Image (cartoon, grey):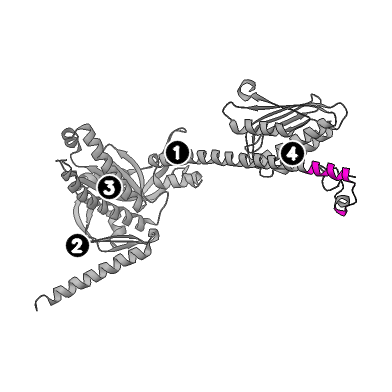
Amino acid sequence: MEKLTLAATARTPEIIFDPAAGKLLLDGESYPEDVSRFYQPVMEAVNAYLTEAGATLTVEIKLIYFNSSSARALTELCDLFDARAADGANIQIIWFCDDDDDITREFAEDLDIDLEHVQITIAKLSEHG
Amino acid sequence: MADSLNPHFPYNFDDILAGSSDPATLRDAYQHLLKQHKRQTRQLNRLVKMADANAAKLATSNAALEQLCDNLSRFVPQPVYHRLLEGRAQNLQAAKRAKLTLFFSDIVEFTALTEQLEPEQLASLMNAYFTEMTKICHRWGGTLDQFIGDALVIFFGDPDSKGSTEDACAATLMGLEMQQRLTALRTEWAASGIRMPMHVRIGISTGFCTVGNIGSQNRLHYTALGNVVNEAARIQALCPPDGVLLSEDTYQLICQRISCQPYIATTLQGRQRKVQLYHPHDNADTTQTSDLIVGNENGFKLYLDATNVTDRDRITRLLTSALDAIQITDHTQTKAPDG
């Protein structure tokens, strides 16, 4: 499976999906003009990878700002992780946020409540860069 | 079989609706739907919360931006500020040749004024003076180039121009209005205990200048350079206190619109021959420049910028009352000999 790399723009985050390393990174700001079009290839690639037997994935989310449409897309992405984890995939989500970023932390914490088969770990953004 | 339209709902809608599902399946489906509903509600709440938080964040950013714009507008000439705000700054980048009307004013015996006033009193006086003059400048659409000590440099014709004649008329009428305003201000200052009244000289000149952003890459100043700038300063020095003095070039542009009288013929640096300087009449004929109507006679002052009138009914009532008042006075005066 090929590595997927999307460079950051003013409105979209950097996305690196490395199946060989079992890592997915979302880093930057997210308010794309067309959220579905932006996140669709990522969802498809991740879903294809996670349906493989014994798939292991570490997800690192380092979004300093995301709009409501992106929040919806992130929810769908996490639902996908939850569904694949229910099927047996080993998935770990680390959501990085600044100490003073209550919006992001509360969003990640709320989202974690809805996930049954995968857990979101909150980490400090500043410590991990 | 799961409903193909909803992969998250692993039951057959058609069977449930047709009532052909067994009670156990119905209960499971019902529980599943409730769970999904709860989850969707949480998601909706989360998104609403997110949207509200982002809106609040945006409001904070907008407030900061408004404050920044407000501060910027104090440091940058108004026409330049509006260009920056509208994203048309690229038009301001290059310096160019343009026909401008330059305005230069200076306070008479400013040094003596500084010696007579306490620093706080002087600062307050100068702030009031520059604030009033700046307001008048903005109303006439001038580009406030700079304050040089007590001097004020304004130009007309860039970045926005209504044509050389309109620009020269605006500069002249602005100068006259400033002197009128200063007359009123002197009365106010005298009432507040400032013994030494402030008098100002104004010089106006028209010609081609280099205008644009001049300076270093990191620090730019939107300004005009050229002999016309110096000429306006020199004409100002020849102007009697409380007056407005025009160069011959400015006079030629405005003479059809604003009545003037010759003042002196003099030699100005950079000129081969003597040039005649002119005073515009401060009781200038009611002059219409574009949408502006300006009049100043004994017992009558009018400044009407029709494009910026917000309460037309009130203005109409005021003007009607004014017309009535003139007619009543006229009627009384006509009848007076009989009475």
Marks 2 and 4, Cα distance to the nearest angstrom?
A: 76 Å
Residue drawn 48% across the image and 45% down it: B85
Residue designated by label 2: B299
Q: Which mark is first along the chain, 1 or 2?
A: 1
Q: Position of residue A95 (x, y in %)?
A: 68, 28
Residue designated by label 3: B271
Which amino acid does the dot numbered 4 rest on? Answer: Glu
Which one is nearer the viewer's eye here, B323 or B170? B323
Range shown magenta: B17-33
Marks 2 and 1, Cα distance to the nearest angstrom?
A: 43 Å
- Crowding at label 3, few (<14), some or many (≥20) Cα neighbours within 10 Å? few
Marks 3 and 2, Cα distance to the nearest angstrom?
A: 41 Å
Asked whether, in this view, residue B238 is left or right of residue B48, the answer is left
Give the quadrant of residue B283: bottom left
Determine if residue A74 is in view: yes
Residue drawn 58% across the image and 26% down it: A99
Image quarter of the C terminus of chain B:
bottom left
Quick one: SS at disc 2?
loop
Residue designated by label 4: A76
